[in-house]
Image (tube, rainbow, N blue to C red):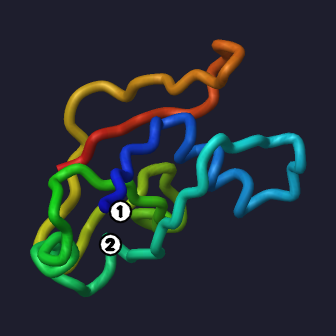
């Protein structure tokens, strides 16, 4: 017997909001177990992905400002930089209202 973990973008955002806020009204239709990983840390990106059996992952991470007076964030990591590719997509809630954004980084 195996399990498939393929949450929708809405389910991932709901999980994070339930863990980081006290909003009892946020509902989730599935249980999601997500580990904390610092993708902007000193660990090589190849080490982060070495243990994974798939190429698509969800990361929730704190961003660091590029400098104190800037609105831009640093995406530097151990051996390079994460770069956003494509346009961000709006994630809608069950009522069709904007709920968050999906961004692809490589």
Quarter of the image containing the N terminus? bottom left
Quick check: 14 left or right of 49? Answer: right
Q: Secondary structure at mark 1?
A: strand
State how far apart marks 1 and 2 are (Cα): 8 Å
Instruction: Check disc 2: other Cα within 10 Å, few if <14, some if 14-19, many if 20+.
Output: many
Quick check: 48 left or right of 34? Answer: left
Q: Position of residue 2 (x, y in %)?
A: 31, 60
Quick check: 4 left or right of 36? Answer: left
Question: Outermost residue toward the top?
Answer: 96
Quick check: 105 left or right of 22? Answer: left
Check residue 74 in the rendering and tell me which mark sits there, or answer none: 1
Q: Secondary structure at mark 2?
A: loop
Q: Are the residues at dot 1 and dot 2 in contact (C-beta closer than 8 Å)?
A: yes
Q: Nearer the viewer, mark 1 or mark 2?
A: 2
**Of label 1 and label 2, which has the lower sequence position?**
2
- Is 105 drawn above or below residue 88 in the view shown? below
At a point 10% along the width and 74% down the height, the residue shown is: 46
Check residue 40 in the rendering and tell me which mark sits there, or answer none: 2
At a point 25% along the width and 47% down the height, the residue shown is: 105
The mark total stands at 2
Instruction: Check disc 1: other Cα within 10 Å, few if <14, some if 14-19, many if 20+.
Output: few
Q: Position of residue 73 (x, y in %)?
A: 42, 57
Check residue 30 in the rendering and tell me which mark sits there, or answer none: none
- Is 85 drawn above or below residue 97 in the view shown? below
- Is 16 drawn above or below residue 14 in the view shown? below
At a point 18% along the width and 77% down the height, the residue shown is: 51
- Is 8 drawn above or below residue 63 in the view shown? above
Q: Position of residue 18 (x, y in %)?
A: 74, 55
**Which image quadrant for residue 41?**
bottom left
């Amino acid at each position: 017997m195996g399990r498939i973990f393929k949450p929708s973008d809405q389910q991932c955002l709901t999980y994070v909001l339930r863990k980081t806020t006290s909003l009892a009204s946020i509902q989730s239709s599935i249980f999601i177990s997500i580990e904390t990983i610092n993708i902007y840390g000193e660990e090589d990106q190849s080490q982060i992905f070495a243990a994974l059996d798939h190429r698509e992952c969800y990361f929730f991470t704190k961003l660091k400002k590029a400098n104190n007076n800037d609105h831009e964030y640093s995406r530097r990591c151990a051996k390079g930089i994460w770069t956003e590719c494509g346009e961000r997509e709006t994630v809608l809630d069950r009522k069709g209202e904007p709920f968050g954004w999906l961004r692809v980084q490589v």
